[in-house]
Amino acid sequence: MKRIIITSLVALFTMGISAQDNFEAFRHLGVGVEAGLHGFGVDVAMPVYKGLIVKAGYNFVPSGDLFNTQFSIDTEDLKEAQEQYDPIMHFQNKFGDEAEIDAGLQLGMSNIKLLLNWYPFQSSSFYLAGGFYYSANNKPFISIHGNTTPNDWAALLELRDKMNDDSYEIALEIANQKYPVVEKDGCGYMQADFKMDPLKYYVGLGLGRCVPNKRIGLQFELGTLFYTGAKFYLQDKEVPMADAAEQLGDAAKTAIGYMEKYPIYPQLALRLNFLAF
């Protein structure tokens, strides 16, 4: 794999040195497709000045869980209430000391982008990139969603029904604030979202021409997004990030701490570009 990457980079650099100048303003159009850490994307590119290319495009990450995990919510008080009245109520669904939450993590990157690529050496395919990414739908950057077991949710409903009291709840408590689990598809459901401002800033560098001299060209790019306004929400309520990290365990504490301290998201992308005209 390492050998393939090195060979591809050498090929890109060699192509750039030997290529003809294709930077005539508004005379050419490139169309590209990409795959990278920002997901999949499409874009169009056009020269606007000697060595300067303007690009517009769209990137998205397909929906689906990146990985699954488990965490627990204390239900000892519910268990004690159930056991106290069980001799006369005869509950069918029993609580344990903890309710297990099966959780999955999704990445919600979906952005339109406007970028400039500057080729400082017109005989080379090396370039610098900068511009903006914008998320029009303000979808959460990271979303953690989880479900209780059907038994735990059935036990809660039975307790509410037999005690005629809807105040019983399975809830996550953070900084003396409770965030109740809600019903979805016959189970308890909880969602946590990490959001940022929709406008992000991007800088990067790479090899390859986004408006190729031949019909097809390759492009390799390294870069990073800079974001602001990072916030954490649990059940659509904002939670101080430090409090959330402390409650959700070591992995979440590390991840949230990193995102708060280093508001960046890296990019590593490989593009296939086509010369439209």
Image (spheres, helix red, strand yellow):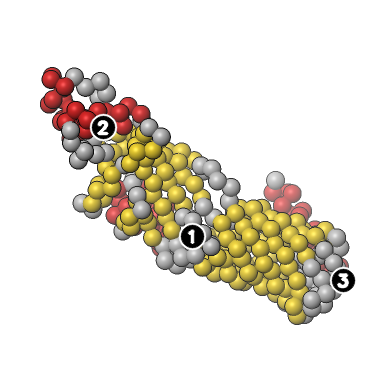
Marks 2/3: CA–CA distance: 72 Å
* Quarter of the rendering containing residue 233: bottom left
Q: Do tag 2 and tag 3 residues touch (Cβ < 8 Å)?
A: no
Residue 157 in the figure: left or right of residue 148:
left
Residue closest to the eye, 228 or 137 = 137
Lower sequence index among marks 2 and 1 = 1
* Quarter of the rendering containing residue 34: bottom right
Above-or-below relation of 152 to 241: above
Which label sits on residue 156?
2
Lower sequence index among marks 3 and 1 = 3
Above-or-below relation of 203 to 3: below
**Mark 3 sits on what residue?**
20
The kind of secondary structure element at disc 2 is helix
Q: Is residue 73 visible?
A: yes
Give the residue drawn at x 70%, y 46%.
1
In the rendered image, residue 221, in percent from the top left (x then y), is placed at 67, 61
Give the residue drawn at x 12%, y 26%.
84
Q: Which amino acid type corresponds to the residue marked 3 in the rendered image?
A: Gln
Give the residue drawn at x 28%, y 47%.
179
Q: Which amino acid type corresponds to the residue marked 1 in the rendered image?
A: Asn
In the rendered image, residue 267, in percent from the top left (x then y), is placed at 59, 59
Marks 2/1: CA–CA distance: 34 Å
Q: Is residue 207 visible?
A: no
Lower sequence index among marks 2 and 3 = 3
**Mark 1 sits on what residue?**
138
Please identify the quadrant where the C terminus is shown: bottom right
Q: How would you rate the neighbour count of disc 1 (Cα within 10 Å): few for under 14, some for 14-19, many for 20 or more? A: some
Q: How would you rate the neighbour count of disc 3 (Cα within 10 Å): few for under 14, some for 14-19, many for 20 or more? A: some
Marks 3/1: CA–CA distance: 42 Å
Q: Which amino acid type corresponds to the residue marked 2 in the rendered image?
A: Leu
